[in-house]
Amino acid sequence: MSRVLIVEDSPTMVQLLVFIIKKLRDVEIDTANDGANGLKKLSEGRYDLVLTDINMPLIDGLKFVSLLRNDRSNGNRDVPVIIITTEGEESIMEEGMKLGANSYITKPVNSQRVIETVRKFINA
């Protein structure tokens, strides 16, 4: 069983991502509505993959990735991270990858692309 955490403030986008990822077998999905809540959930349990938006309240996705990668006390520090966002500018994409994201998908999402990208990181 693989555990996936979706960090996204849009309830509609959360529903869509959950719907897409549930097509995969043996995947347990948890959600957080912002980066602060995402970090809290990561401190409480083990995850195999994180999908995060960039534009969120409290802690945005770039700061979230940076904090996750630099937290030596967190057992999820090296968990793969996929950024899913409307921010398609090359500079933002490069920054996300430089901070430690493993992949980057721009919205609107293509369900097949999401599935293929998720499968790169978990056995589902």
Image (cartoon, helix red, strand yellow):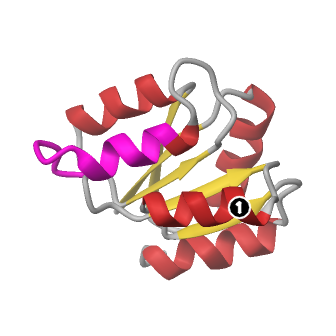
Residue furthest toward the left?
73
The x, y position of residue 25, in whole percent, is: 52, 68
Q: Quadrant of residue 83?
A: bottom right
Q: Which residues are magenta?
A: 63-76
76 left or right of 6 in image: left
Visible residue check, residue 86: yes
Please state which of residues 121 and 97 is positioned toward the viewer in this rendering: 97
Q: Which of 48 and 68 lies nearest the eye of the viewer?
A: 68
- Answer whether residue 22 is visible to the viewer in this image: no
Left or right relative to 41: residue 123: right
Q: Quadrant of the N terminus?
A: bottom left
Measuring from the top left, give residue 40's x and y in whole percent: 31, 27
What x and y, as percent, mark residue 12?
Answer: 80, 32
- Residue furthest toward the front? 91
Residue at the image position 45 percent from the left and 75 percent from the top:
121
Q: Classify 10 Å Cα crowding around label 1: few (below 14), some (14-19), many (20 and above).
A: few
| Residue appearing at x 45%, y 58% in the figure | 99
Q: Quadrant of residue 54?
A: top right
| The magenta stretch spans residue 71 | yes
Q: Residue at x 54, y 77 (%)?
A: 119
Say whether residue 18 is magenta.
Answer: no
Residue 122: image location, x then y, percent = 43, 73
Query: Residue lying furthest right in this view?
Result: 108
Give 63 or 18, whichever is nearer the viewer.
63
94 with respect to 111 (left or right): left
Rendering quarter of residue 41: top left
Residue type pointed to by label 1: Ser
**Element at label 1:** helix
Q: Which residue is mark 1?
A: 91
Q: Is residue 27 above or below residue 41?
A: below
Q: Nearer the viewer, residue 18 or 7?
A: 7
Which residue is at 69% across, 56% downward? 92
